Amino acid sequence: MILCLHIGNTHFVGGVFDGQDLKLEFRRTSSTRISVDEFGLFLRGVLLSNEIPLQSVKQVAMSSVLPEATHALIGACHKYFSVEPFIIRSGVRTGLKIRYRNPLEVGADRIANAIAAVHHYPDRELVVAGFGTATTFCAIGPDKTYFGGVILPGIRISLEALVTRAAKLSSVEIAPVDHVLGRSTAECMQSGLYHGQIGMAREIISHIRNEAFQGRQPLVIGTGEFAGLFEPTDLIDVIRPQLVLEGLLLAHNMNS
């Protein structure tokens, strides 16, 4: 079995694959101050509580956007699984033609998402929309050219900014809202957060369509913690919550 792990800004996400089948998915809050043993004991507990023996994990693939936590996770792989993890970083094979001025700047999670997207939807013009701590968009051509993307504050960051910078605003539940006009402060905030993300996403996808695809409509793939919120809309064509884990598995196999 292969253990795939991604350290994001907000959550640490993991999955166990048996071949191509995702047998287990789990997550916890990310931390820059986590230790080797905290990582290792967490992984050990998750696997054993789901009846997956530690010795069945033969390989580990990982990516991280938190350099401070990366070293601890590598140490946990050594100590608890006796495995040298494969890490998505500069120099590994991705199968993508990255058009960034500096390809090293592309986030590991965005690379993993793109690898999985072109695998599942070959020869298609694609936009991968990631709804997590940040909301991101990546444009990918049918020849696997990674044209570039867009990064903007995610829905949770927007909520935190409102709560911390406006004295009379309190936190609200992040939820889909079927109307725009709110009749309470909480409803107004929920509407603004939800429909604000939709409006920004529509505008950005429209520009991507014109700049990268000569006006043609790409397939829009939604992923990330909050992607499911936008399923009732026509914003996203398909939602794949485990895209980053699938991309890690594919990258690992590509480099084996």
Image: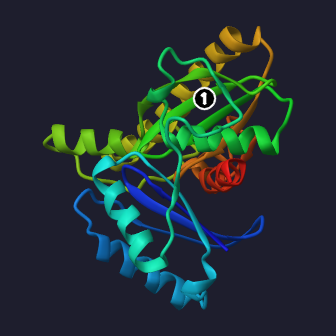
- Where residue 142 appears, as percent x and y from the top left, is 81, 25
What residue occupies the far right of the structure in this picture? Answer: 123
- Where residue 79 appears, as percent x and y from the top left, is 39, 76
Amino acid carrying mark 1 in the image: Cys
What residue occupies the far left of the structure in this picture? Answer: 167
- Where residue 251 appears, as percent x and y from the top left, is 66, 48
Is 165 placed left or right of 86 in the picture? Answer: left
Q: Quadrant of the N terminus?
A: bottom right
Is 90 placed left or right of 144 in the picture? Answer: left
Q: Is residue 256 above or below residue 83?
A: above
The residue depicted at 53 percent of the width and 83 percent of the height is 47
The residue depicted at 42 percent of the width and 51 percent of the height is 8
Q: Is residue 181 visible?
A: no
> Of residues 213 and 49, which is closer to you in this image?
49
Q: Dot 1: what SS? A: strand
The count of marks equals 1
Res 78 quadrant in image: bottom left
Q: Is residue 241 above or below residue 80?
A: above
- Where residue 106 appears, as percent x and y from the top left, is 49, 30
Q: Is residue 135 above or below residue 173?
A: above
The residue wearing badge 1 is 138
Res 55 quadrant in image: bottom right
The residue depicted at 32 percent of the width and 47 percent of the height is 67
Q: Is residue 127 above or below residue 16?
A: above
Q: Is residue 40 visible?
A: yes
Res 245 quadrant in image: bottom right
The residue depicted at 75 percent of the width and 27 percent of the height is 144
Is 106 placed left or right of 213 in the picture? Answer: left
> Of residues 166 and 82, which is closer to you in this image?
82
